Image: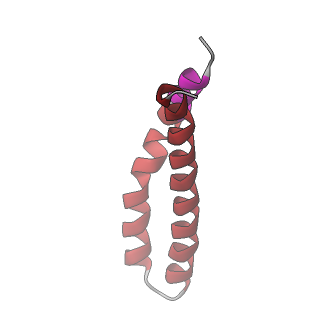
Amino acid sequence: MSNSDLLPSLLYKINENQLALKAAIMELTLWVEKRGSADVAENVRASLTAIDRNEEFIKMTLAVLMTPD
């Protein structure tokens, strides 16, 4: 398998890790919010919007990269 064949798989796994981290951070955010730190929770949510904003583009690009020529 060539390096160029590995790139789409690598990017897919990195994206998968990113989404898992986002889910874990959101769990912690909910926990913090329940304990009265709404400001902190809102700041975290605002920081995570970049993941949401870029998710569809990443998925579409990965699909193109993983499509056989």
Residue 59, position as x, y percentages in the image: 55, 34
Between 39 and 17, the one lying in front of the other is 17
| Total count of labels | 0
Q: Is residue 8 left or right of residue 37?
A: right
Task: State the extent of the magenta-drawn residues as a range.
Answer: 59-66
Measuring 52% from the left and 88% from the top, which residue is drawn there?
35
Measuring 51% from the left and 68% from the top, which residue is drawn there?
25
Check the image and tell me how it is coloured: secondary structure
Which of the 4 image quadrants contains residue 40? bottom left
| Placement of 10 over or under 61, stated as above or below | below
Q: Main secondary structure of the magenta part?
A: helix
Between 29 and 6, the one lying in front of the other is 6
- In which quadrant of the rendered image does the C terminus lie? top right
Residue 67, position as x, y percentages in the image: 62, 19
Q: Which residue lies most toward the front here?
A: 1
Between 53 and 8, the one lying in front of the other is 8
- In which quadrant of the rendered image does the N terminus lie? top right
| Placement of 69 over or under 13, stated as above or below | above
Measuring 57% from the left and 68% from the top, which residue is drawn there?
24
Residue 29, position as x, y percentages in the image: 50, 74
Between 46 and 8, the one lying in front of the other is 8
Asked if residue 56 is among those painted magenta in the image, a careful observer would answer: no
| Placement of 9 over or under 1, stated as above or below | below
Q: Which residue lies most toward the right here?
A: 68
Q: Which residue lies most toward the bottom here?
A: 35
Which of the 4 image quadrants contains residue 62? top right
